[in-house]
Image (cartoon, grey):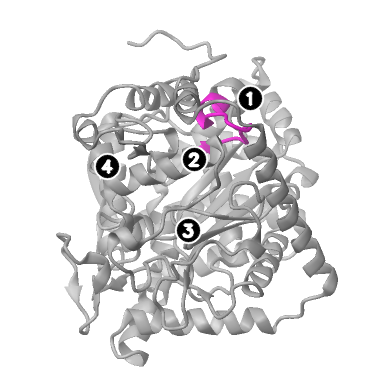
Amino acid sequence: MSNAQQRLSALSTPVLKSLRRGVEKESLRIRPDGTLATSAHPPALGSALTHARITTDFSESQLELITGVHARADACVGELTEIHQFVYRHLGDEAMWSSSMPCLLPEDDAIPLGRYGSSNLGRIKTVYRNGLSHRYGRRMQTISGVHYNFSLPDAAWNALQQADADRGESKEFRTRAYFALIRNFRRWSWLPLYLFGASPAACRCFVEGRRHGLRDLGSHTVFLPHATSLRMGPLGYQSDAQASLQVSFNGLASYARSLQRAMTEPYPPYEAIGLRDGDDYLQLATTLLQIENEFYGTIRPKRPIRRGERPLHALTDRGVEYVEVRSLDVDPYAAVGVGAQTMRFLDAFLLHCLLSESPPDTPEEISEIGGNQYRVAERGREPGLRLAQHGRERTLADWGAEVIDGCEPFAAALDAAVGGTAHADALAAARIALEDPATTPSARVLREIEQDFGKSYFDFALARSLQKRGEMLALPWSAEQEARYRRMADESLAAQREIEASDSLPFESYRQQYLAQDLLAGMRLPAET
């Protein structure tokens, strides 16, 4: 029996039925004509600062809808659907854009930053976004995605630690295991990108004034013929400045040190921007990263943070609690941007990443991982595409089949625990997509743009957006549901007022204290070599 099988056998049926997942889904608000809605975050939705389910991402126009933690994929989709229903009932004639690449955008400066009120905490969030706008431009920040949060219950960690005969602290064992998951996910992250990428085209307005290698498709659309996810390629949410970081995921110590260095050492191009213009803050800091959230990646180690706490401080103080998969495009064919079958594939895939052997990464492998991501993002459906693995090349099709084979025992165990064949079905659908690229979402999107929408990405995405709006508004909605979500909105507004009333420090003092937190607090870090 392999180590992975031994670890899997240590997980009981109740544990496998209790895997935890949640979703954060971003969407731009649009007017009926498909242009960006630049109005303020609707007050009826509550406070974007404090609401647990409805907030904004980079822009005031960019909703972020967040589920709670669920033990079943269909329950997670159910809550996300309910949140969408409430939001649509308070958007007037607006809709939510159904794709990752943005709608028709105004001039860069007209894209509104997220606003979170007058408190120091709220101002920190807005200044951080202003820094992003100066560093990368506002258009890039309007790209939307789906984040999938995944974790195991406490009972699973007790069982796995016993199976590995590990006698160390449980917090450190769990953190090491999550970093092992992260390393394997990064090695194989091109596979979900191929399977679920749904952004092979974009509106021409998105690339105006930018250098790019996209081709024309009609008069208002740019694309790449074999692309899966422009969002995850060089055109998308990426940073040349961060390419020099070479962050290692061999453990929390190396990860934390890399990010701390990027947040404390001056970076000349960002020093040139400056910190303030009179009383207006241009960014939070002039370092390579303002804060840790600025570090781009396909997956992050996470845990809940306390009010005003830095995410890296929370990790080093209390360990990793879950991982956040960040590479999913908004699925224009799923009612709420992601479907239960995608989640079930990810559950089997992430268990494979967690329980299988995960050797340390190296600078050479980190470079290969980035190269593979870009190849699949821009050319994933290209016949015979080859990827780099440990200095050699192999075809995406062969390597993908090997990874899916590795997922099979985990899908079978999940099906045995919950009943049915839904996880095996998700793997079967992945095999079909691997064998026939024409069945992938990215291929389907391009095919419909060309055949049904006059080669216009905008017309395709607007039609899907308005269709989904109608579908959500047509679903049953009870007075009890409305009252529950109105209560959450009211409570969030009250919480924001309480935070604003409790402020006592000038903002500059608060900013300095926030950035001065000991990010490596509580860690027993080995000496650097």
Q: CA distance from mark 1 to mark 3?
A: 47 Å
Q: Disc 4 vs disc 2: which is toward the camera?
A: 2
Mark-to-mark CA distance, 1 and 2: 46 Å
- Of 166 and 123, nearer the camera is 123
Amino acid type indicated by mark 2: Arg
Counting from the top left corner in percent of width and height, residue 80 is at: 65, 63
Contact (Cβ within 8 Å) of mark 1 with mark 3? no
Mark whose residue sits in front, 1 or 4: 4
User: Disc 3 residue type?
Assistant: Glu
Q: Which residue is mark 4?
A: 368
Query: Mark 1 is on which residue type?
Result: Asp
Q: Nearer the viewer, residue 75 or 240?
A: 240
Task: State the extent of the magenta-drawn residues as a range.
Answer: 301-315
Identify the residue under disc 2. Answer: 123
User: Which of the two discs, 1 and 2, sits closer to the camera?
Assistant: 2
Sequence-earlier tag: 2 or 3: 3
- Mark 4 / mark 2, whichever is N-terminal: 2
